[in-house]
Image (cartoon, rainbow, N blue to C red):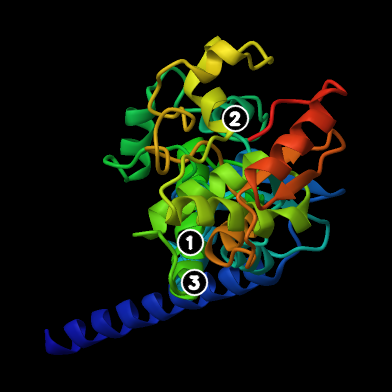
Amino acid sequence: MIKLIKRLIAWSLLGLLLVVGILTYQLLSFQHGVVDLQEPRVFLIKSGSSIKGIAQDLTRQKIINDPWLFILLAKLKGVETSVRAGEYSLEAGHTPDDLLEIFTSGSSIQYSFTVIEGWSFRQMIAALAQDPIIEHTIAGKSNEEIMHLIGYPEQHPEGMFFPDTYRFPKGTSDVDFLRRAYQVMQQHLEREWGQRDSDLPLKSSYEALILASIIEKETGVGFERPLIGGVFIQRLKRNMRLQTDPTVIYGLGENFDGDIRFRDLKKDTPYNTYLHAGLTPTPIALPGLDAIRAALHPADTKALYFVSKGDGTHYFSETLEEHNEAVNRYQLQGRKKSN
């Protein structure tokens, strides 16, 4: 009886070793075998996909012939939870081992979307909604709902997203994109705030962001930004009103028809810096890094006034008399109203 038991155990072990050997051979052959691709193909891994779902998709698309061996290979390599969402370019000659390397490296096909300096939050959301690659999930949601979704429910959205060109894989949602742009703005803003000039009449990095947004909207000419920043800093120090048209326009909202009039300057909104001293309650646009630096490192100037010369640049004046002369000179040519 004991001999029989020993024989059964021996045969069981032998059978187990045989199964393990066959499985090992199959796995090694599978691991290093060339996948069934005759030409390059794009393979999509959706956000939240499991290794089982990926293996089934690969099999369904006839790229591999055994989903379970692919799953086993991923588990043995310890990467079953490390695959990244995105589109991947697969080529003839790849092995299943190569596929796992590609899917876990993050080397997916990248797309881009550019957030423009000076955009309002509304303009950015509208442009984002037209992007064909971004997954759209916030259509019809309020600003408050959007900020809640990205994780900053108490924050006003205006000015809080960094203008830049962002690269991202297919499957990125608008919420993911906005969260990233928000965090990039915070990183830039806090770094620049920590390096700010001394003796600025700004109490927080948020006030710096507000001023930067006004500078951004006042000029598209890079070299003028520190000068305009210097004028606004001088006005704030002297408790003078900023008297800047872009804030009035922002306060008018969708009622602005593209032409600012004298009556608009008299319309009482929280953003009318002709009527209210100090900064506006929130930023009025998305400022770029140059505008932020202009707010925190303004030019050392005695100028208190500036007027558009009609060519995109401005004439700066230290006295009201000089400013009035400049206004007459340029407004007689039909230029826009001065600050």
Circle 1 or circle 3, nearest the eye: 3
- Write down the residue under mark 3: 196
Q: Quadrant of residue 148?
A: top left
Q: Position of residue 272 (x, y in %)?
A: 46, 27
Badge 2 element = helix
Q: Distance between the residues labelled 3 and 2?
A: 26 Å
Q: Quadrant of the N terminus?
A: bottom left
Q: Is 222 placed left or right of 203 in the picture? A: right
Q: Is 152 placed left or right of 105 in the picture? A: left
Is 338 in front, or is 219? 338
Q: How far apart are marks 1 and 3 (CA)?
A: 10 Å
Residue drawn at 71 percent across, 46 percent down = 111
Q: Quadrant of residue 264?
A: top right
- Relative to 5, is 272 above or below? above
| Mark before the other along the chain sequence, 1 or 2 | 1
Circle 3 or circle 2, nearest the eye: 2
Residue drawn at 19 percent across, 83 percent down = 4
Badge 1 element = helix
- Write down the residue under mark 1: 189
Is 240 in front, or is 175? 240
Q: Which amino acid does label 3 sit on?
A: Arg
The residue lying furthest to the left in this view is 1
Crowd band around label 2 with a 10 angstrom C-alpha radius: few (<14), some (14–19), many (20+): many
Circle 1 or circle 2, nearest the eye: 2
The residue lying furthest to the front in this view is 321
- Write down the residue under mark 2: 245
| Mark before the other along the chain sequence, 3 or 2 | 3
Residue drawn at 51 percent across, 46 percent down = 161
Badge 3 element = loop
Q: Which amino acid does label 2 sit on?
A: Asp
